[in-house]
């Protein structure tokens, strides 16, 4: 079985590859999970013509409740604030070979950790659907202005 | 004397720190110069409210002519195209403790390499001046529209 860190890396690489195919410029941060734990680097940043997505990346074997430490959420919030971007949690579900995208306003504060319940995770959009939706919205807001 | 790779890393870290102080969200790519030589990761990406700067980073002890391989320029061009950003070469001059910023249209094709002559490097704006200028221009274009 692969170590947690290696699974994390390969999830990040997979996310970058998928975002690239969807037309984004995407970049992984340096050595996330390793020495630079408390830096403000997000795991992945993706940009397409002004739309900036800022990701904290998680890997789980199956659909289950996830707890996320404060500082991991804080760093994507601050990065997104400066960039004018959207802070997101992307969860790779190994068993389903699926990515789910969770906006930070779905996070619940429980026992001093941010919680994504199994239900929220299950009802969150898949990567492709989330991106299509965002790009459509962006296009619509262009037309209106 | 530090190795070329270590000087490269510390130059990238310095650039990220400076951009962060200038209000940008900035991120280094993973392990540039190492295994992922031919990926499309730029060395550094910086974003501030819709302004996206895509950097290839160089370190030189002194002001001198620099040659850059094709693929390094190609990767920042493609990343910037997708992101709707500006592809730039940032050169750290060790002796002067200065950053110079060179837009890709100043690159000269010589013997199948991209060349930044000593003169072009010397006449290129310092990081702080380049950024101030870009932010002013952006503000002006907002006012006009």
Image (cartoon, coloured by chain):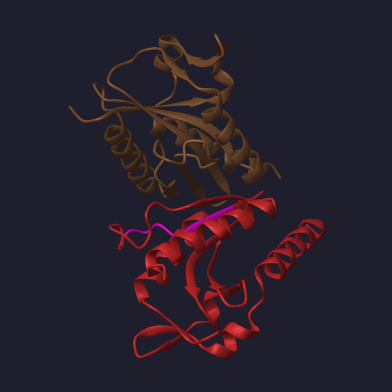
Chain colours: A brown, B red
> Relative to B55, is A60 above or below?
above
Q: Main secondary structure of the magenta part?
A: loop
Residue B74, percent across and down? 39, 69
Horizontal and vertical percent for residue A140? 60, 40
Left/right of residue A8 with respect to residue A89 in the rendered view: left
The correct choice, above or below, for A137 with respect to B139 in the image is above
In the image, farthest residue toward the right = B143
The residue sitting at the left extreme is: A1
Can the viewer see residue B84 in this picture? no
Front-most of residues A1 and A45 = A1
Vertical order, B143 against A22 (above or below): below
* Closer-to-camera residue (A17/A134): A17
All told, the count of numbered labels is 0
Q: Residue A93 lies in magenta, yes or no?
A: no
For residue A8, which quarter of the picture? top left
Give the quarter of the image for residue B2. Answer: bottom left
Q: Residue at x 55, y 84 (%)?
A: B63
Q: Confirm whether residue B9 shows in the render.
A: yes
Residue occupying image coordinates x 44% and y 20%: A124
Looking at the figure, which quarter contains the C terminus of chain B? Answer: bottom right
Residue B126's spot in the image, x, y percent? 66, 73
* Residue B132 picture location, percent across and down: 74, 64
Q: Quadrant of residue A44?
A: top left
Q: At 31% from the left edge and 60% from the top edge, which residue is drawn?
A: B34
The magenta-colored residue range is: B39-46
Q: Nearer the viewer, residue B27 or A86?
A: B27
Q: Quadrant of the N terminus of chain B?
A: bottom left
Which residue is at a point 55% across and 44% down the rendered structure image?
A52
Is residue B1 positioned above or below B62 on the image?
A: above
């Amino acid at each position: 079985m692969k170590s947690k860190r290696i699974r994390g890396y390969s999830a990040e690489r997979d996310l970058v590859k998928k975002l690239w195919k969807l037309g984004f410029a995407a970049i992984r941060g340096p050595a996330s999970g390793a020495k630079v734990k408390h830096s403000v680097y997000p795991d992945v940043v993706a940009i397409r013509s002004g739309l900036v997505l800022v990701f904290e990346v998680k890997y789980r074997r199956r659909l289950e409740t996830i707890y996320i430490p404060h500082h991991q959420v804080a760093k994507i919030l601050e990065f997104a604030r400066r960039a004018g971007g959207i802070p997101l949690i992307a969860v790779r579900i190994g068993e389903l070979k699926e990515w789910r995208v969770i906006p930070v306003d779905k996070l619940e504060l429980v026992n001093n950790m941010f919680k994504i319940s199994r239900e929220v995770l299950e009802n969150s959009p898949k990567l492709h659907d989330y991106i299509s939706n965002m790009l459509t919205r962006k296009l619509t807001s262009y037309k209106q202005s």
